[in-house]
Amino acid sequence: MQRLTEGARSWTPEEWRDLPAYLRGVDLFNRWYFWEAHEAWEGLWRAHAASSDPARFIQGLIGASAALLKLHRGEERAARKLGRSVGERWNGFRGVWMGIEVERFRAEFDRGLASLDEGGLVALGPQTPVIRLID
């Protein structure tokens, strides 16, 4: 299935510092505007074939946003499902990718969803993962 959006500009992961939509999505995510972060990243995702590394990486971020939104809304089943999809999308990504230390973010994200495994839902707070961009 082709996911390319007509007229969308192709980009490379090395250009992340110069992608306003990417940086806006990170900012929105870190401010807990998860739906809006997803919307900011959607065009970047659609600019590449669905199976490409750039699309899979962005789709992982979109999935993380959606999972945290569902967690916040108390939709446990959906949060779990979306949380698993992040790991699936990000299989093979290591080190720093698009300014994100992948293993660190995944560990923080997993801790943020750990309340589901402990039988409760945690409100957004200090345990909510953030995206720390590094060079």
Image (cartoon, grey):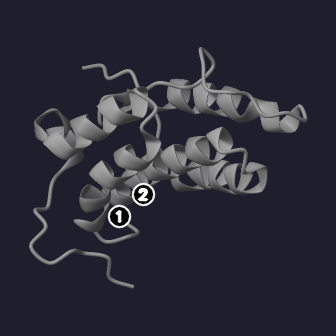
Is 94 or 23 nearer to us in this picture?
Answer: 23
Q: Residue at x 53, y 50 (%)?
A: 66
Residue 118, image quadrant? top right
Q: Is residue 83 above or below residue 44?
A: above
- The residue that appears at 42% across and 37% down in the rendered structure is 33
Q: In the picture provided, is 77 more to the left or to the right than 10?
A: right
Residue 123 in percent (x, y) is at 68, 27
Label 1 crowd bin: few (<14), some (14–19), many (20+), radius 10 Å:
few
Q: Position of residue 102 (x, y in %)?
A: 47, 32
- The answer to whether one can see residue 92 in this image is no
Q: Are marks 2 and 1 in contact (CB under 8 Å)?
A: yes
Instruction: Assign a secondary structure to mark 2.
Output: helix
Q: Amino acid at mark 2?
A: Arg
10 Å neighbourhood of mark 2: few (<14), some, or many (≥20)? many
Residue position marked by numbered label 2 in the rendering: 56
Q: Which residue is mark 1?
A: 52
Label 1 SS: loop
Q: What residue appears at the point 28 percent right and 49 percent down from the top-left corner?
A: 40
| Quarter of the image where the N terminus is located | bottom left
Q: Amino acid at mark 1?
A: Ser
Given the current orientation, which residue lies at the most extreme front position?
A: 73
Instruction: Determine the residue located farthest toward the top in the rendered image.
Output: 126
